[in-house]
Amino acid sequence: MGVAHGLLGGRKAVMFPFMGAGAVFLIRIGLGVLFAFLMVRMFYPRGGILAVVGFTVFLVGMAYFLTHLRQKREEEGRGPK
């Protein structure tokens, strides 16, 4: 039994119970733009705005894909112990 399981009385812990999907999306977009800008400037200094936008889409898409995989794994009972 994990700490969250014991504290919540057996209920499933929600990662961000106080934020809706829109707030999580805006945070992911903001962080995606920041990290995409930094990575493009470090590894491809002549990259333009299109490279930053493309990498932002990739980063945010991967965040949603990995969240989907994590939720699927937890539903199947193979979650972290």
Image (spheres, helix red, strand yellow):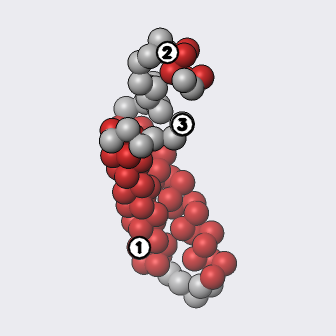
> Label 1 vs label 3: CA separation?
36 Å
At a point 44% along the width and 16% down the height, the residue shown is 10
Circle 3: residue type: Lys
Mark carried by residue 8 = 2
Which label's residue is closer to the chain start, 1 or 3?
Answer: 1
* Whole-percent x, y for residue 62 in the image: 42, 61
41 is higher (above) or lower (below) than 10: below
Residue lying at the far bottom of the rendered structure: 46
Q: Residues within 10 Å of mark 1 (few under 14, many from 20)?
A: few
> Label 3 vs label 2: CA separation?
16 Å
At a point 50% along the width and 52% down the height, the residue shown is 30
> Label 2's element?
loop
Which label's residue is closer to the chain start, 1 or 2?
Answer: 2
Point out the image quarter for the N terminus.
top right
* Whole-percent x, y for residue 27 in the image: 48, 45
Q: Residues within 10 Å of mark 2 (few under 14, many from 20)?
A: few
Q: Can residue 71 be seen in the rendering of this structure?
A: no
Circle 2: residue type: Leu
Q: Which residue is mark 1?
A: 54
Q: Residue 35: name its quadrant.
A: bottom right
Q: Quick one: 67 or 17, which is closer to the camera?
A: 67
> Label 3's element?
loop
Q: Residue 6: name its quadrant.
A: top right
Which label's residue is closer to the chain start, 3 or 2?
Answer: 2
Q: Which residue is mark 3?
A: 81
* Whole-percent x, y for residue 37 in the image: 57, 69
Q: Quick one: 6 or 26, which is closer to the camera?
A: 6
At a point 54% along the width and 68% down the height, the residue shown is 36
* Whole-percent x, y for residue 70 in the image: 41, 47
- Taking the image as shown, residue 5 lies to the left or right of residue 66, namely right
> Label 1 vs label 2: CA separation?
40 Å
At a point 54% along the width and 36% down the height, the residue shown is 81
